[in-house]
Image (spheres, rainbow, N blue to C red):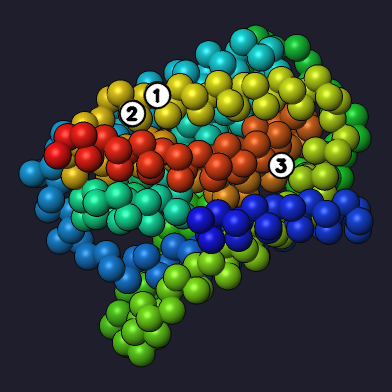
């Protein structure tokens, strides 16, 4: 709960700072910071031999893939189309393509799930970042004819004016952290030891700083510029997506340790990464594009503890 309070505080303070200052311009350095301080420490525990468990835990791996990348992306597209707002539709599609997240391993550990399976799924989802961004990069061209024209009034100069370059986030968030982790393991054992000892503190401090920064950007100040109807539509669409996501997670997983790991990879989205990627495309999709990602923070963080309680009660009943 302390971590939830920390993230919510970062959101509120970031929005307030951006509102008072007019908002900051985006710097790609935040991507590097996320890769170095959030992703790299988790890779210290990763060894290629860990992938051997895929052979004996194929069911969990396949369940993660078809539910997240087939079922939930379809749900996101249907809800997005119903909203008749391409910005909302694109944001939901992006969230659907990014299962798990920075806090997913914490929930996996505290729920008694299979941590090794959860970590391998986490790594597989990260490895899929490149094809995910390639797919998302084609969304506007394919979906634009199905939606009303985008209103870009007041957006010029807020985003960075270009679509996502798929290789960039993959390199900064996956390749560079992986190389750094191998160098540290081979030549800097003291760094690995220090990071292992203080990783919770490092992760919390980094998460707070990144979330605060992202919500203080000019893009996040769009929250104060959109109409009440757009806010309501985005809130309802995001709530509907999460309602289906949580229902699927509860109904399509059992009480086995493997399925508990899959449960949390279904129930959570990599929101911070989605917000970083959203900054690259707000000039394409308009002001409403940022809203579902922002609402996702409050819905996902607010419901995580509730979902954990549901899982705990199910375990007691099963016992």
Q: How many marks?
A: 3
Left or right of 316, for residue 97: right
Figure check: 220 above or below 175: above
* Residue appearing at x 47%, y 18% in the figure: 75
**Marked residue nearer the N-terminal end (3 or 1):** 3
User: For the residue labelled by badge 1, is the local secondary structure a helix, a strand or a loop?
Assistant: helix
Judging by the rendered image, the residue that carries numbered circle 2 is: 250
Sort mark 2 into few (<14), some (14-19) or many (20+) by Cα contacts within 10 Å.
some
Give the quadrant of residue 50. bottom left
Marks 2 and 1 close (CB-CB < 8 Å)? yes
Residue at 25% over, 30% down: 253
**Residue under pointer 1:** 247
Pinpoint residue 38: horizontal percent, then vertical percent.
48, 64
Residue drawn 51% across the image and 56% down it: 1
Give me the disc on residue 239: none
Residue shown at the point (32%, 87%) measured from the top left: 189
Residue 90 location, quadrant: top right
Quadrant position of residue 174:
bottom left
Horizontally, residue 227 falls left or right of residue 177, namely right
User: Is any atom of residue 129 visible in this view?
Assistant: no
């Amino acid at each position: 709960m302390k971590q939830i309070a920390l993230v919510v505080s970062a959101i509120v303070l970031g929005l307030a700072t951006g509102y008072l200052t007019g908002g900051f311009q985006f710097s790609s350095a935040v991507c590097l910071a996320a890769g170095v301080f959030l992703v790299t420490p988790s890779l210290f525990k990763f060894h290629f031999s860990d992938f051997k468990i895929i052979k004996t835990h194929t069911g969990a791996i396949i369940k993660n893939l078809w539910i997240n990348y087939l079922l939930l992306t379809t749900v996101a597209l249907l809800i997005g189309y119903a909203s008749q707002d391409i910005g909302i539709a694109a944001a939901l599609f992006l969230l659907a393509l990014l299962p798990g997240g920075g806090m997913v391993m914490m929930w996996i550990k505290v729920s008694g799930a299979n941590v090794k399976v959860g970590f391998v799924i986490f790594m597989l989802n990260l490895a899929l970042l490149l094809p995910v961004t390639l797919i998302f990069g084609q969304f506007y061209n394919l979906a634009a004819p199905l939606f009303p024209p985008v209103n870009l009034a007041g957006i010029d100069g807020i985003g960075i004016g270009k679509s996502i370059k798929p290789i960039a986030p993959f390199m900064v968030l996956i390749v560079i952290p992986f190389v750094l982790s191998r160098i540290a393991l081979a030549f800097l054992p003291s760094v690995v030891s220090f990071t292992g000892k203080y990783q919770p503190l490092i992760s919390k401090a980094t998460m707070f700083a990144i979330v605060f920064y992202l919500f203080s950007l000019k893009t996040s100040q769009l929250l104060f510029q959109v109409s009440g109807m757009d806010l309501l539509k985005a809130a309802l669409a995001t709530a509907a997506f999460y309602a289906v996501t949580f229902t699927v997670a509860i109904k399509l997983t059992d009480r086995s340790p493997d399925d508990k790991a899959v449960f949390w990879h279904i129930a959570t989205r990599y929101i911070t990464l989605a917000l970083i990627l959203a900054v690259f495309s707000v000039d394409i999709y308009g002001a409403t594009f940022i809203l579902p990602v922002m609402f996702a923070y409050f819905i996902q963080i607010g419901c995580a503890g509730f979902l954990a309680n549901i899982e705990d009660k199910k375990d007691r009943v099963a016992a």
